[in-house]
Amino acid sequence: MQEGTGKMNDDVNIEVLLDHYRSPRNYGSVENPTAQITEHNPLCGDTVHFSLKIENGKILDIKFVGQGCSISQGAASILTELVKGKTVGEAKAIREEDFLKILGIRLGPNREKCALLSLNALKKCII
Amino acid sequence: MQEGTGKMNDDVNIEVLLDHYRSPRNYGSVENPTAQITEHNPLCGDTVHFSLKIENGKILDIKFVGQGCSISQGAASILTELVKGKTVGEAKAIREEDFLKILGIRLGPNREKCALLSLNALKKCII
Amino acid sequence: MRVNPEKLKKDFPIFSNNPDLVYLDNAATTQKPSSVIHAVSDYYSTVNSNVHRGVYKISEAATEMYEGSRKKVSEFIGARDPSEIVFLRNTTEAINLLSYTLGRRLKKGDEILLTEMEHHSNLIPWYFLRDAGIVIRFARIKDDFTLDYDDFQNKLNAKTAIASFTETSNVLGSINDVRNLSSMCRDNGTISIVDGAQSVPHMPVDVSKIACDYLAFSGHKMLAPAGIGVLYGRKELLDEMHPFLGGGEMIGEVGYNNATWADVPWKFEAGTQNVEGAVGLSAAIDYLKAIGMDSIRSHERSMIEHIFEVMNSVEDLRQFGPLDSDKRGGVFSFNIGDVKPFDILNQAATKFAISHSIHPHDVAAFLDRSNIAVRSGHHCAMPLMGRIGVSSTARVSPYIYNDAAELDLFFDELSKCRKELGR
Amino acid sequence: MRVNPEKLKKDFPIFSNNPDLVYLDNAATTQKPSSVIHAVSDYYSTVNSNVHRGVYKISEAATEMYEGSRKKVSEFIGARDPSEIVFLRNTTEAINLLSYTLGRRLKKGDEILLTEMEHHSNLIPWYFLRDAGIVIRFARIKDDFTLDYDDFQNKLNAKTAIASFTETSNVLGSINDVRNLSSMCRDNGTISIVDGAQSVPHMPVDVSKIACDYLAFSGHKMLAPAGIGVLYGRKELLDEMHPFLGGGEMIGEVGYNNATWADVPWKFEAGTQNVEGAVGLSAAIDYLKAIGMDSIRSHERSMIEHIFEVMNSVEDLRQFGPLDSDKRGGVFSFNIGDVKPFDILNQAATKFAISHSIHPHDVAAFLDRSNIAVRSGHHCAMPLMGRIGVSSTARVSPYIYNDAAELDLFFDELSKCRKELGR
Ligand SMILES: Cc1ncc(COP(=O)(O)O)c(C=O)c1O
Ligand SMILES: Cc1ncc(COP(=O)(O)O)c(C=O)c1O
């Protein structure tokens, strides 16, 4: 019961995430996006909006705006860096487990929803 | 938990009830009844049918037919003896507690329903 | 593994507190082993909290337990994914959920096919739809108390939107071939619903093999607490259904003028969840799996075969159920003499008709003197009572903690009852 | 009697197992005292069985406990008769029962009056009726977070068939004068429904004084197990209602073509009852009555007054609820900075808007490091979140085992959180 559940300081990567939260990368909106999506987490109202420019199956640009907790917003920022320049196929292939591993922080089932909000939004948007 | 619950032999009166069950009094149907009712116990399908001849507010005759367990049928027989000759007002005044006391056997809440079937039927019928 | 009732019995505190208790009413509800009782009280004593929405340790832990139980249930019945498992109160609620939500889409003249051996919980929810002009039909049972599959097939027609049938009858013990029935439904484009209340606790049940659309069952009949039950549904079907109860947890977004729903299964779990119930159910499944569902089925088969062997020692005994133990669960309904339905004309004419029978209530009360707990009544299957020509029956339904010696004791007392109360 | 949290805490095993736990999420669910935990496990270990239909000792005993619990509940809330108490799963199910059954009688254009501060469980069930052309209206809340009674009165009109309102808001802590509201309803010929989920556990609630038509509440928010809740309804009204769930126990007689219903309250209790839940609820009521509901109300009043005294020590704190402790339960919702609803245009323009606020989830996660359990999110009241101009809040809701020292610890940690996470 004491393990694996939201102890924010237990993990080295929490600082990386918090840095993304405080200074989000790729924040804003792509002009003339070819795809965009707004997604909410009903748990708490965490919101992310992604706008993308995709050409020939490649993600040329991706930006986000959003509002919510450090985990949802930090994860969104990290995700933009991760998929920018990748193909749509590569982005779609990122599994939930993979992304959680990349974030590298241990989360309980409830906070996981925050962390996975942006990945799920992105996947819905690039179907 | 061990008390008051259907130990058929604990009570002296059980023999009286069983006698009524085996040799029911007033069994049959009154001819040209002025009131009659059929009532079921949904617990088990116990059924009683009462037919009555009431004149000037007095129960001149009452008979029953029925089918069911010893308690429901014995109680019906006892009830006919109890109210025959009484006024409707007197019959209506018999409370559940009173009738259970007259039966004189200890019953749990589930078997009580069997014992009270006939009293409830009679009351509905002479409203 | 062979079921060892004597050993298992030690796991159930009720039997140490009532050493003489011969509990033979397991079709109504089962007793609880210590592991289940402790799972529930440990939950209260360590992580009790609201699931899904708490950003703190005990809530995360409770959520893991709750969703872990869902996963365990899904594996137990062979579902493809935990999201196909909806936690509800019991079988009754599950079938009502279906009648209310699927019922929304039906139109006047559509038919629902049931069988003559259904429990009220698989009758009344459908009867409600009659107000909307839905027609309810019943597949007949045969004289040997098995389902008439031809009649079922014949009554499936272009209008049959839904068929709902029990896997094991709680009165007759008849085991229906629900795989066959579901396949007939599929071929006919009819939704198939299996009432698993009396099968899931007693034998291996695998929805991937049955290939039904829905399956409902209750925790309290399989060693778990009351208040927790399960609706399995194929994900594609659950996805497109309207929600049933509205409230907390089942929503996506809500404004004053609009609302969207959460994904399944949460869409169907409005209000604060019975987490301790799910935790108890998980412990119950662990207990049952350790024994093995195949072993449990074998044990109950041996119980009913033992009953078949000794039942004729009781004079005037009538039993109601298939005599082929391949098609028969452990349930044994019987009467002493003919306990006919009430018929006022007949009754008045034949003077007093009880003489050749003992009412099942009197049978049960007599057995209770020896601490043998059996059920008596209509078993929430009144129409079936009429069908088999009785007003009610007594019923014995053994489980893993019952053995042949207990059945022998039961039959001994039953013979005494026949002598003392019969005429 | 004064509530002695330190002493009471010893009755709750979760606190001996988690000595540092500061549990402040009681509006979500409460912890369970040993007396409740033991009532449940003793039930399993002594008389566990099916109620109402068993003609054997343990079933009679279980029935007495189940119906005894009903009697206790009826006295606890001042009902005239136990038959006015229906056992259900929780508040959510109770309100859905009403929306489904009362909804049958409504016609297009009929209105239902709610308030802006309702929980999803008192919104969505009514929203479902919009499909049938029913109009939902909302009595407004004022800037001081109290209900606007004039607006409620104004919105009651000839078409208002039903009004459903909470006694205490689970977000704002506002206590509504439900006696007044019910009287307005009665004068208007409108059915009144009180959501007592947040009041019955926290203060004396007496339906004979409120004179409402219905009251709903949940066991798990008042020390009892999950899976048991209560609908109180005036007998005359319950009598004439259509049943909700169909199944075992709720019937009178059933044939293949027809069915009649049992008397209330059993008409509404389809399926195997959660007897252990009722037994646990009974033990919980005993525990609460021994303290006294007046004392509990006083304790919570002192808690919220203490909060008012110290809350300003935290920079940028915004609180959402009436500042008059006469009109305020123990619930305390707050944010650090402005946690505005998401607005994409605004968001992109202001570059990055989180700078002046800390998201409630981060607040809760921070507090969790010190084992302080608080809720964060929309509290199943999304529309209200919009109304008070936030996307979500953090919430503290003390109960009988919480004291001022715990609140002080909470505020200390909150100040640290403000420093560490704020910018
Ligand atoms: C005001 C209010 N109403 C209704 C509910 C729903 O209660 P439950 O989830 O127990 O059905 C809650 C709590 O969740 C509440 O706070
Ligand atoms: C065949 C069958 N279906 C449904 C039910 C209803 O189960 P529950 O009362 O747990 O909802 C039962 C048992 O009561 C049953 O035996």
Image: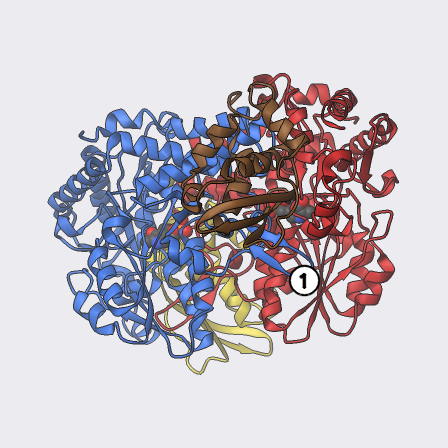
Chain colours: A yellow, B brown, C red, D blue
Residue at 39% from the left image edge and 66% from the top image edge: C254
The picture places residue C256, in percent across and down from the top left corner, at: 34, 70
Secondary element type, mark 1: loop
Q: Is residue A30 among the parts visible in the rendering?
A: yes
Q: Residue furthest bottom?
A: A32
Residue D189 lies left or right of residue D83; in this view the side is left
Frontmost residue, D353 versus D104: D104
> Is D300 rendered above or below residue D193?
above
Q: Quadrant of residue C376?
A: top right
The picture places residue C232, in percent across and down from the top left corner, at: 64, 53
* Residue to which mark 1 is pinned: D257
Frontmost residue, C124 versus D32: C124
Residue C123 lies left or right of residue C248; in this view the side is right
The picture places residue C42, in percent across and down from the top left corner, at: 48, 29
Task: Report if the beta carbon of the residue with label 1 is closer than 8 angstroms to ligand 2.
Answer: no
Q: Quadrant of residue D335?
A: bottom left
- Counting the numbered discs, the total is 1
- The three-letter amino acid code for the residue at tag 1 is Asn
* Few, some or many residues within 10 Å of mark 1 (<14, 14–19, 20+): few
> Is C81 rendered above or below residue D409?
below
Residue at 65% from the left image edge and 70% from the top image edge: C134
Frontmost residue, B118 versus C370: B118
Frontmost residue, A79 versus D129: D129
Residue at 17% from the left image edge and 69% from the top image edge: D150
The chain identifier of the residue carrying mark 1 reads D
The picture places residue D401, in percent across and down from the top left corner, at: 27, 33
